Image: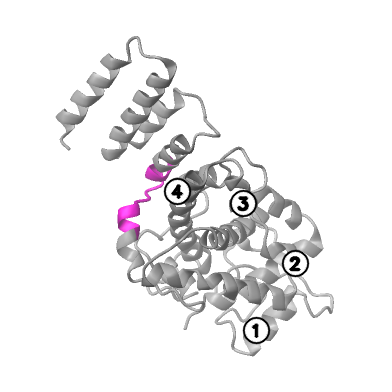
Amino acid sequence: MTKSFTQTILCLILLCACGASKEEEFDLIMTKAKLLLTQSKCDEALFELGQTGYRHYDAKYLQLYSSALACKGGFSVTSLFGELADLTTTQAGILGSLSGMASSPTTSSTNKAFINLQSAIDTLLYAGNISTVSAANRAAEFNSTDASNMNMQALYMVLAQLGRYFYLHGNTNAAGKKGARDTPETNDCLTDYTFFDGGAGDSQVLRAFATGGGTITPCAGNADGHSELKDGAPNRNKYLCQGVILFNNLLDLLSNISLSGDNTSELQDLQSNIGDLCTLAGLGAVCTVKTQSVCESMAAVPADLNSIESFFVVVFETMLTDL
């Protein structure tokens, strides 16, 4: 579509808007926003959508609004599809494979692209103005088709954001090997492990046991985490929870949509894999929490923060290695 043709269409939309009803004006704004996104005019599309007021219960509006935010976040479904064909979907390979995608290189959690893609994801996860995130709660606010469409869109964005998260905090190289990039950081663990009071479930005990048994590698120390996830780092709990929430929502989305194709169908196996890992470790609520604010409230309680750190050992450090 040429620029001049798009401009002509936009002018016609504006002309047609004169005398239109409220709903007709809304439809015209949606059409205009879609056309702007075809030109990758993310901010302009968001501006248009902002004219309608935020619509918590309009699935098509929310999907388009999310797409505009994802556009600002440098996310492309087309590009992601091209990489999904090469995605390793085994338990031991999925996180490294995601971090090795072309869209994954990220400088920090305050990077604008990272923040915008997270906002795009949250637009869909909290659709229907729900306060507790889950596919079941969204399904209670929307019809099955709309809920399914939003879940599918959110799934692809979550996959991309997980790639960015583990590229950043895992210090992965292009092959998705943890602790192998060493620019600008040199961490071999995702986070610091701070709990030790003699209990078998302490995060330091779990890390040492897993390292000694060869389950996680490298990560041979308790104070070798990424700077954003080090003990005492500003917003540490927020960033720890981002990883937990993204992953738990990935599993929730996978269990509530129908996937086809060799690669996507294998992703569904992760539901049982992670469920077993968490259950065997006795980590409780951290295995199922899908709401950022709830997770951050948990992280303010020492025992629950220990569970979150233990989740990183049992799930993330185990699934993301240098092998």
Gap between marks 2 and 1, in whole Å?
A: 19 Å
Left or right of residue 237: residue 17? left
Is residue 5 or residue 272 the one in the foreground?
272
Q: Where's the N terminus, which quadrant?
A: top left
Residue range highlighted in magenta: 69-80
**Circle 1 sits on which residue?**
210
Q: Are marks 4 and 1 in contact (CB under 8 Å)?
A: no
| Dominant SS in magenta | helix
Gap between marks 4 and 2, in whole Å?
A: 30 Å
**Mark in the foreground, 2 or 3:** 3
What secondary structure is found at the residue carrying circle 4?
helix
What secondary structure is found at the residue carrying circle 1?
helix
Is residue 193 or residue 276 the one in the foreground?
276
**Circle 3 sits on which residue?**
136
Instruction: Check the image and name the residue furthest to the front.
Output: 144
**Circle 2 sits on which residue?**
284
Is the residue 283 above or below the residue 64 in the image? below
**Mark in the foreground, 4 or 1:** 4
Q: Residue at x 37, y 58 (%)?
A: 103
* Residue 189 in view: no
Estimate how packed mark 1 is, as few (under 14), some (14 to 19) or many (20 or more) residues with alpha carbons within 10 Å: some
**Mark in the foreground, 4 or 2:** 4
**Mark in the foreground, 2 or 1:** 2
Estimate how packed mark 3 is, as few (under 14), some (14 to 19) or many (20 or more) residues with alpha carbons within 10 Å: few
Sequence-wise, the earlier of marks 4 and 1 is 4
